[in-house]
Image (tube, helix red, strand yellow):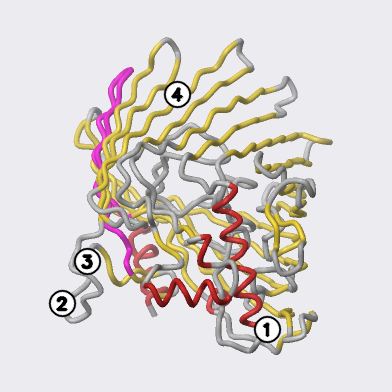
Amino acid sequence: MRAVFLVAVLAGASGLAAEANGYLAARAQTTRVRALGLIPTDELPQQSFLLEVNAQVRHSLAERSFVYGDLSLVGQLASDYRGADREGSEVTLPPRDVRSSHPRVSLNELYLSHEVRPELTLLAGKKRVVWGSGLAFNPTDILNPAKDPTDPTLQRAGAYMLLVEVPLETLAFSFLASPAVLEQDAGIPFRMLTYPEWDPKDSQYHYQLAARGYALVADADVNLMLFFGNRYQDDFERKLRFGASFSKVYFTDYELHLELLAQSGSSRDRVEGRCVRDAFSVLGCLAEGTPVVSKPLLEEKTILPKALVGGRRMFADDSLLSLEYLYQADGYTHEEQQALVDALDLLRQARRLGLPIRGFALPGAGAAEGVPQRFSFEPLGRHYLFATYQKPKIRDDFTFAATGIVSLEDLSGLLAPSLSWSAKDWLTLTVAAFASWPGPSGLGTEIRSTGERASEYSLLPLRYRALFEARAFY
């Protein structure tokens, strides 16, 4: 009913003068799961079919005001679940009712914008605002659902906010306040900012405040950002953060960009290594009151920056080559990654004994808010390389693209090629694939129970994924 109500609101607001467009997309996807790996695959289907109906409506309310909405209705069918039995053999699981496959609404953007004067604009609603300059990853983007680095434009979902913008000739200033979405159902939020008194999960306000100053300096785009938030998509309380970005084109075809987020401490979970060497060490830590998983750096005062530096080359045929390096100081060290692998190994052994333990998932196979992503990325380590190549206008109507993600610590990674065909002005057909590799055997960590080597991308619950998508625009 909420979905029907939202569609009715958009349709009613549009009127006859509205600008409306959108698309109908159908995606067939097959995945080969790593059923015998450390991550349980019970809720990861090998076969799925997704249908998305999207509408984008812009309606002018007055000379300087307009309403914009970007809404998708998403349905998904899933089948062929694989897992491991108690003997450690791969088996087919019975059909499962997985929440991620239920029909839902993806309310990507819905906002009201009013231009008070050319130098002052007010906005209220949900919008995707990104101030950083990175292509595959944005360290300074702490507002929006994370994007897929293999297709950065796929994720369009934004954040709820009140936004004030002051655009000047070579300067611009932005100020926003965003309440956190605490609970939602089928993509529609019903609890924001704080919990009610009759359901007091905590008594705090969950929010993010941000200010941005932009300047065009010697043909370079420079942004300075300041963030202050409380328990907004993480466990930081009253956290102050600083961000900056830089982008400039050199010699017409070369672009260089930098992006930095500076913060003290880290909200990342860490496993206590001495507690997961075997079952007895787990019991020992529980007996002495030592948590197996905690956030030891949450109150740390040391600055732990996240930085991205990269460059792009535009060729005469409109091809693009992008290389980006990401560093995050709060990423896991080798010892911390080994502790994580030890914990996953113990959880797998417990599940094979029939204990009701589900474990926890790693990034790379799930979906954030919005339309289900092809691949989700959340780096565990400290050093990464992104390589992106796009070649359009192959025989006029074909586009080839490929993205590689490499962990520079264990040299494991993921390759995602795709080929799109503009069969008609209104129809695009795409085939894409995702395949991971484990990295050299001399690097990475060890699975103690088997003696096998493990690396970041060999831990993913999927071996490879292939999909075919048809998208019809109107």
Any magenta on residue 167?
yes
Any magenta on residue 378?
no
Measured Cα–Cα span from mark 4 to mark 2: 45 Å
Nearer to us of marks 1 and 3 is 1
Query: Can you identify the residue that label 2 sits on?
Result: 197
**One can see residue 7 in this view:** no
- Ranked by sequence position, the earlier of labels 1 and 3 is 3
Q: Are marks 4 and 1 in contact (CB under 8 Å)?
A: no
In the picture, measured across the screen, residue 436 lies left or right of residue 275, that is right
Query: Can you identify the residue that label 1 sits on?
Result: 352
- Ranked by sequence position, the earlier of labels 4 and 1 is 4
Which of the pair 137/359 is nearer the observer? 359
Q: Are marks 1 and 3 in contact (CB under 8 Å)?
A: no
Query: Can you identify the residue that label 3 sits on?
Result: 194
Q: Are marks 2 and 3 in contact (CB under 8 Å)?
A: no
Residue type marked 1? Arg
Residue 270 against residue 147 in the figure, above or below? below
- Ranked by sequence position, the earlier of labels 4 and 2 is 2
Query: Can you identify the residue that label 4 sits on?
Result: 246
Measured Cα–Cα span from mark 2 to mark 1: 42 Å
SS at badge 3:
loop
Q: Position of residue 446 (x, y in %)?
A: 70, 58
Measured Cα–Cα span from mark 1 to mark 3: 40 Å
10 Å neighbourhood of mark 4: few (<14), some, or many (≥20)? many
